[in-house]
Amino acid sequence: MAGEPQSDCLFCKIVSGEVPATIVRETETTVAFRDINPQAPTHVLVIPRVHYPDAASLAAGAPDVAADLLREAGEVAAQEKTDATGYRIVLNTGEGAGQTVFHTHAHVLGGRGLTWPPG
């Protein structure tokens, strides 16, 4: 059920503390942690504490949490000092777009020049 923790979800396990992560920020609604396979000098994932499989379902089911997710992505960029030089927020949806964990997550990427299109 959307919003409820899923026992087979890696990110739900990070939220619960069952799986360790290098957490850089936490709020009442979000958790931000370093990506284990960084694609840029700054690569932090921001996830909602509630489980929704992708950004569209999060926006439809919990729009306030979707807003928190984006706000926290900006806070992460500021904390990581990439806000002045530029950063990217990426929300992949579906396997064809590269989503591998089906719990909404925003990638905050920065710390080097980022080309466009990304791939």
Image (cartoon, rainbow, N blue to C red):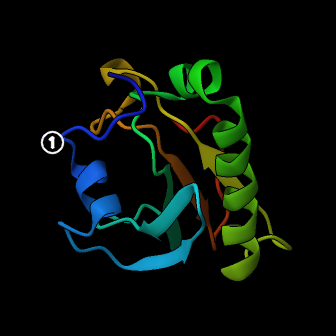
Nearest to the observer: residue 54 or residue 49? 49
Image position of 84 (left or right of 1): right
- In the image, is 35 to the left or to the right of 25? left
Place of residue 39 in the rendered image (x, y in percent of width and height, measured from the top left): 43, 61
Quarter the N terminus occupies: top left
Residue 39 vs 60, above or below: the answer is: below
Q: Where is residue 116 in the image (x, y as percent from the top left)?
A: 67, 40
Q: Which residue lies furthest to the right in this view?
A: 84
Q: In this view, does 68 lie above or below 61?
A: below
Q: Where is residue 26 in the image (x, y as percent from the top left)?
A: 55, 71
What is the crowding at mark 1: few (fewer than 14 residues within 10 Å), some, or many (at least 20)? few
Write the residue at 66% across / 80% down. Answer: 80
Residue toward you, 109 or 7: 7
| Residue 41 in sight here | no
Q: Residue 77 is drawn in which quadrant?
A: bottom right
Name which quarter of the figure residue 112 lies in.
bottom right
Q: Answer whether residue 86 is visible to the viewer in this image.
A: yes
Residue situated furthest left in the rendering: 8
Q: What residue type is labelled 1?
A: Ser
Residue at image location 77% in from the left, 75% down from the top: 78
Return the residue nearer the eye: 71 or 1: 1
Residue that mark 1 sits on: 7
Q: Toward the viewer: 64 or 44? A: 64
* Residue for point 58% across, 42% down: 90
Disc 1 is placed on an element classified as: loop
